[in-house]
Image: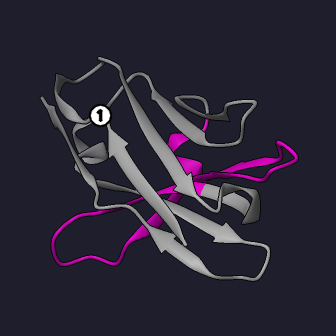
Amino acid sequence: QVQLVESGGGLVQAGGSLRLSCVASGAIFSINFMGWYRQVPGKQRELVAEISRGGSTSYVDSVKGRFTISRDSAESTVYLQMNSLKPEDTAIYYCKAITYGRTVYWGQGTQVTVSS
């Protein structure tokens, strides 16, 4: 079992920055990919960024150049540095972990609100 706890969300003005954190506990050795997704009411949850245990990253086009995903050396925490935030980045951000056995775990989500 893996538990994920997100933090770092909040209210920020357009152009500002936030840093989200997701701390994993439990069977962290089993985690391969970790990522951040976001969801707004009435829309599907979408991938924002993900990172593999080996450090390979991928981003949705709308955040490239503005967001950076990283992972600590202990492989237990993943971060999402969000710069140049836009009102359209407003969403609930969820942390996701995928194990080598392809089991998926989700965090409880953290609200990010960007005011114009």
Near-viewer residue (99 or 88):
99
35 w.r.t. 41: above or below: above
| Residue type for callout 1 | Lys
Q: Secondary structure at mark 1?
A: loop
- Relative placement, left or right, of 3 versus 116 is right
Q: Quadrant of the N terminus?
A: bottom right
- Relative placement, left or right, of 76 versus 6 is right
Residue 8 lies within the magenta run:
no
Q: Residue at x 51, y 41 (%)?
A: 63
Provide the residue span drawn in magenta: 35-64
Q: Position of residue 55 (x, y in %)?
A: 82, 42
Residue found at the very far bottom of the displayed protein = 102
Residue identified by numbered label 1: 86
Crowd class of label 1 (few under 14; some 14 to 19; many from 20; radius 10 Å): some
Q: Position of residue 74 (x, y in %)?
A: 72, 35
Q: Quadrant of the C terminus?
A: top left
Total labels drawn: 1
Q: Residue at x 23, y 24 (%)?
A: 14
* Quarter where residue 89 is shown: top left
Q: Position of residue 45 (x, y in %)?
A: 38, 72
